[in-house]
Amino acid sequence: MDALKKQVGGTHYKKGYQPISLICKLQMNFVQGNILKYPSRFADKNGKEDLQKAVHYCQLGCELNPLNVAVFSRREALKYVQKNSLPIDFVEFIEEICNQNWLFCSSYILRLSEAAYKDSKL
């Protein structure tokens, strides 16, 4: 059985390239993985709440400073963005997740919120 073909609850990961696949390929830690996952799916699942969760993980990253072993691959990031119909600047967001640039990531998520909800408050 292919575990990536199975999803328990919902269909928000039924797109072409699941976040877990990119998280594993780039060797992201738990905090980085969640910062990637929530903005990737917010439009298909929990909306603004998912963006709030992502910002919270940025705050956790600042405070906890988890071990960074992520290895950015522009090719993989671009493939992820294209297969999931995400904006092209999401590639830079993925790079900054890998670099643990929590301030950039928080700002990017706020811009997503502004664009989606015409509201900068999360």
Image (cartoon, rainbow, N blue to C red):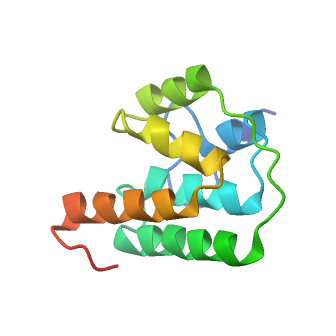
Q: Position of residue 71 (x, y in %)?
A: 74, 35
Left or right: where does residue 26 sit relative to residue 1? left
Q: Quadrant of the N terminus?
A: top right
The one nearer the camera, 9 or 67, is: 67
User: Residue 91's x, y, as percent?
Assistant: 47, 35
- At a point 15% along the width and 67% down the height, the residue shown is 118
Q: Nearer the viewer, residue 102 or 78?
A: 102
The image quarter containing residue 86 is top left
Q: Is residue 50 above or below residue 16?
A: below
Q: Which residue occupies 61% across, 71% down?
A: 57
Whether residue 8 can be seen here:
no
Where, quadrant-wise, is the C terminus in this rendering?
bottom left
| Coordinates of residue 84 in the picture (x, y in percent) | 44, 35
Instruction: Decide: is 23 above or below 49.
Output: above
Q: Is residue 97 above or below residue 118?
A: above
Q: Residue furthest top?
A: 75
Image spot of residue 92 (x, y percent): 47, 38
Outermost residue toward the left?
118
Tell me which residue sits at (76%, 75%) in the image: 64
Q: Residue 35, can we see it?
A: yes
